[in-house]
């Protein structure tokens, strides 16, 4: 809007006023033309001219207000235009037939077409062929339904890859409520869709894994049970047979029975491990705590493994500063933990010594450590060492017939005893496992 120039009008009013004034003064001074009517007329003219002057000033003021208002409107309009233009999402204004009338930069970028070519193009041109009739059907309903939110359909820009779009479209109405145009917000949700699909797939896989894990645990528990009973019988009868065979009666049979006993024992201990592990995983293993001497237990375990360490020429020793430490815990399970760590230490050490140590810690806790001078464990493997079936030294493990369950059971037992286990190892230098336990386990 341009402002109206009132200055000529002002000058004109001033001229008329001036002339009226002169005429009025002359009329008063000149008795020949003096008449009441003339004077009254001139007086009225003068007043009218003055009023005109006031009206002119008011008009000028109003004009200034209007000019200021217009400038504010222009600034606001520019601001909205910029917001529309630089919005991160694609905005389009179309007529009721979906023909593009306005489009912002994001829209031209999304549809890969210049602004000039996009204007006057029907939006349906950018909808995937398979969805065009559906798009038209919805378009014809828009004057009635007015708004559709997050309408998902495949679209395709000019000479570009198709993408998944989420469209929000709203009918714009005039003062009488009649739809006059459509306002479109179009978002490319291809990445979101792909992420959702991946997430769904992962969730499905997760469910399958959880189910597989449950079936595996169930299978392990059943198998271990089914195997344990006949294995116990085989071991029992072969030990009985061993006792009945007279020494040197038939050395071949004696050696065969001895092998049956040895292998049965080994198999039974593996079955026991599997059974313990499946119970621990199913949280069905319970502690039976009582008070016992840790020193006594250490002596017994070392004694039990003495022949194993002797066979390898290793020194097996106990290290403690107070032999009178007593624990309130499950001695069978504490023994199982120590035996597991000690037999691993002997298994994976070829020379030097294996030490079992225990010390009192503040706040009613104790530390048990098993230290060896063996092959050690690489730092990257230390993170996984407590996972079930994780074996690093495949060669030595096979030779030593491990299951890869030992440390998983140890950790699960230590956690059940409200304790924690850490490892400190260097390849070629040896390994130390440290366990911290409360002296009195809570039940
Ligand atoms: P396994 O029945 O195979 O011994 P574990 O869970 O007890 O199963 O141990 C897992 C793997 O950790 C072993 O196969 C071995 O590679 C490694 N390992 C355990 N203890 C030691 C140790 N003291 N020194 C070196 N490696 C060890």
Image: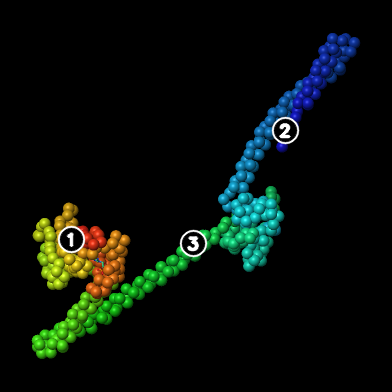
Q: Residue at x 18, y 86 (%)?
A: 256
**Residue 254 in the image, given as x and y percentages of width and height:** 14, 86
Secondary structure beneath disc 3?
helix
**Rendered-image quadrant of the N terminus:** top right
- Judging depth in this view, the residue of 310 and 270 nearest the camera is 310
Q: From this view, report whether residue 12 is shown above or below residue 439.
A: above
Residue 246 in sight from this viewpoint? yes
Judged from the image, the secondary structure of the residue bearing numbered disc 2 is loop
Query: Which residue is outermost to the right?
Result: 32
Q: Earlier in the sequence, mark 2 or mark 3?
A: 2
How far apart are labels 3 and 1 at the CA level?
48 Å
Distance between mark 1 and mark 2 Cα atoms: 95 Å
Residue 196, given in percent of the width and then of the height, sits at 49, 63
Q: Is residue 213 left or right of residue 13?
A: left
The mark lying in front, picked from 1 and 2, is 1
Residue indicated by mark 2: 3
| Image quarter of residue 437 | bottom left
Q: Which residue is situated farthest in the bottom direction here?
A: 249
Mark 1 residue element: strand
The crowding category of the residue bearing disc 1, from other C-alpha atoms within 10 Å (few below 14, some 14 to 19, many at least 20), is many
Q: Residue sitting at 25 percent across and 61 percent down?
A: 427
Which quadrant of the render holds ligand 1? bottom left
Residue drawn at the location 30% of the way across and 70% of the way down? 389
| Whether residue 240 is visible | no
Mark 2–mark 3 distance (CA, rounded to whole Å): 58 Å
């Amino acid at each position: 809007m341009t402002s109206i120039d009132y200055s000529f009008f002002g000058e004109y009013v001033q001229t008329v006023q001036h002339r009226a004034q002169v005429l009025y003064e002359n009329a008063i001074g000149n008795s020949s033309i003096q008449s009441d009517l003339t004077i009254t007329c001139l007086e009225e003219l003068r007043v009218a001219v003055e009023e005109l002057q006031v009206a002119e000033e008011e008009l000028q003021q109003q004009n200034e207000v209007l000019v200021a208002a217009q400038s504010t409107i222009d600034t606001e309009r520019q601001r909205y235009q910029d917001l529309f233009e630089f919005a991160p999402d694609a905005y389009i204004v179309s007529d009721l037939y979906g023909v593009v009338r306005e489009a912002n930069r994001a829209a031209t970028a999304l549809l890969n077409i210049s602004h000039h070519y996009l204007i006057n193009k029907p939006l349906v041109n950018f909808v995937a062929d398979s969805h065009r009739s559906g798009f038209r059907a919805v378009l014809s309903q828009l004057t009635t339904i007015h708004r559709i939110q997050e309408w998902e359909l495949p679209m395709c820009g000019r000479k570009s890859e198709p993408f998944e779009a989420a469209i929000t479209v709203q009918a714009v109405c005039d003062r009488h409520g009649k739809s006059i145009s459509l306002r479109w917000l179009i978002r490319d949700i291809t990445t979101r869709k792909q992420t959702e699909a991946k997430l769904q797939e992962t969730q499905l896989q997760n469910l399958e894994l959880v189910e597989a894990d449950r079936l595996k645990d169930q299978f392990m528990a059943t198998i271990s049970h089914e195997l344990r009973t006949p294995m116990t019988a085989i071991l029992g009868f072969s030990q009985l047979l061993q006792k009945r065979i007279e020494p040197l009666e038939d050395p071949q049979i004696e050696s065969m029975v001895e092998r049956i006993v040895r292998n049965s024992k080994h198999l039974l201990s593996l079955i026991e491990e599997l059974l313990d592990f499946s119970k621990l995983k199913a949280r069905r293993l319970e502690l039976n705590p009582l008070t016992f001497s840790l020193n006594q237990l250490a002596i017994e375990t070392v004694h039990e493994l003495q022949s194993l360490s002797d066979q390898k020429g290793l020194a097996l020793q106990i290290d403690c500063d107070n032999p009178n430490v007593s624990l309130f815990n499950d001695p069978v399970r504490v023994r199982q933990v120590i035996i597991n760590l000690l037999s691993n230490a002997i298994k994976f050490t070829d020379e030097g010594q294996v030490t079992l140590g225990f010390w009192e810690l503040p706040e009613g806790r104790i530390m048990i450590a098993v230290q060896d001078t063996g092959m050690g464990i690489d730092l990257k493997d230390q993170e996984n060492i407590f996972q079930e079936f994780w074996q690093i030294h495949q060669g030595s493990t096979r030779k030593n017939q491990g299951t890869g369950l030992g440390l998983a059971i140890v950790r699960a037992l230590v956690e059940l005893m409200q304790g924690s286990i850490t490892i400190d190892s260097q390849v070629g230098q040896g390994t130390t496992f440290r366990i911290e336990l409360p002296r009195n386990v809570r039940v």
